[in-house]
Amino acid sequence: MDQISGFSKLTKKEKIDWIASQLDNTSAEKFLTIKRFWQDNEQEQKVFDEFSENTITNFIFPYGIAPNFKINNKLFCVPMVIEESSVVAAASKSAKFWQNRGGFKAEVISVEKSGQVHFTWDGEKTALVNFFADYKDLILNSVQDIVQNMEKRGGGVKDLELVDRTSDLENYYQLSASFNTCDAMGANFINSVLEKFATTFEHYFQQEINKNNIQGQLEIVMSILSNYTPNCLVKAHVECPINELGNFGEGIDSNTFATKFKRAVDIAYHDRQRAVTHNKGIFNGIDAVILATGNDFRSIEACGHAYAAKDGHYRSLTKCEINNDIFKFEIEIPIALGTIGGLTNLHPMAQTSLELLENPSAEQLMKIVACVGLAQNFGAIQSLVTTGIQKGHMKMHLLNILNQLEAQDEEIEKAKEYFKMNTVSFSAVREFLEQSREIQ
Ligand code: MEV
C-alpha cells in the first residue's frame, strides 16, 4: 500500500477507487463490489456515512428476534444484532422455558453515573481541601447552562467531591462527580460538565494560590466520564420449584439438572478460566440488544468485566441458589445505557428496536437487557450440562457451512436430515455434498 495524505478529504467513490488502485486486478475488482452494500435511499446512506469517518460502505449484521420474553409479567419480542449462530436461538429457547415458569423478574437498583477531573497538586493538601470547601458551590454552579435541560428532566449533577489518591500515585487527586442522566447515556453531557468543572477549578484555584502566596503546582491531567458504573445497577432473576424444571432427557431429571446447573455456575464463580467464557456468553445476549438499540457495547462490556472483578478476583456475573427445593438463577450487572439521544435517535434500526420494545425508558431497557443476559447464560449452561454445547451449536453452524459451500435448497434439506445423526464439521459437510452431487 502507498502512503496517502488527505484520504479523509476524498469523496466516498474516490476513497474506494484509491484503495482499488492499490490492489491487484482480481482483488480490486472484488473490492469495487462493496458498493453493493450501499443503501438505495441516499438520504439514509448519508446518515450511516456520518456516524463515523472515512466511511466507504456498510457492514451488514443479522438482526434477529427473540420472542416470548416475559419480564415483570409483560411480554417482549427482543431485537438482537449478532453474527454468531445459536445465540438468538438459545435466548429464545430460554425465554420460552421461563415464560411458563413465572417469567423473569427485574429491578433497577440505582442509576448513578460518574466522571472525574484527574489532576496533580504538589503543594500542601490543606490548601486544596480548604479551597474545595469554599469553592465547591461555585464550581457546581459554573455548569448551570449545561445542566439546566437535564435538571428539568429530573437529572443533573448529584455530587462533587475531592478525592485524595496520593497514596496510589504521587500528587494525584480527583474531582469526582456523580450524575443522573435520566434516559440519556449522557457521555457528552458528563464530559462537557467535567471539562467546565476543570476550567473553573483551575482558574479559581490558581487565583487563590497566587493571592495567598501558596507554594505548589496544579496540573489538570484530563477530564472524562468513567465507564465503570457500579452504581448504575440492575438485577434480574428467574425461579421455580425444582420439580417444575422438567426433564432434560437421557436420565437428567429436574433434581440432577438443578444440582449440575448450580455446580456449573459455582465453578464460574471460583475459576477465572471458566468465568471469562461464562460471562462472554452473557454478553452474547447483552451486546446483541445493546447493538440493536444503538447503545455502546464497548462501555457496557468494559464495565461488566470490571464489575465481575470487583472483589479483586474475576467471577461469574450470575449466581444460582437452591433453597427449600426452589431453584433461583440471578444476575446483577451494571448497565449504563440510553434510550434517547445519540445513535438511539439517529440509527433507523435502533429506533425500530426501541419501538418494538414499546419505547422503554433507560431503566426499562436496563431490565430487558439484564434478562436477556440471564436467559443467554441459562441457555448456555443448560446445553453445557446436558447435551454439550456442540450439538446445538453445530446444528446452527451447519447452515453457515452449507451457505459457504453454496449448497442449493434441496441439498440443505438433505444435509439437515443427515446431520441430525452425524457430527457436523466443515470437511464432513463438504464430503456429504460431494457425495450427494456424485450420486446425481
Ligand atoms: C459461546 O459464544 C458462548 C459460550 O461458550 C458461553 C458459555 O460457555 O457459557 C457457549
Image (spheres, rainbow, N blue to C red):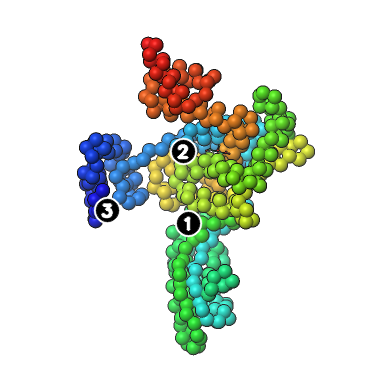
Element at label 2: loop
Q: Amino acid at mark 2?
A: Ile
Residue tagged 1: 186
Q: Amino acid at mark 1?
A: Gly
Based on the displayed image, in which of its 4 quarters is residue 16 positioned? Answer: top left
- Between marks 1 and 2, how big is the CA–CA gap? 25 Å
Residue tagged 3: 8
Element at label 1: loop
Q: List x then y, in percent, for residue 193.
A: 46, 65
Nearest the eye: 416 or 426: 426
Q: Residue at x 52, y 52 (%)?
A: 302
Q: Residue at x 54, y 67 (%)?
A: 176
- Between marks 3 and 1, how big is the CA–CA gap? 28 Å
Q: List x then y, in percent, for residue 253.
A: 71, 27
Q: What label sits on residue 82 in the rendered view?
A: 2
Q: Is residue 373 above or below residue 207?
A: above
- Between marks 3 and 2, how big is the CA–CA gap? 29 Å
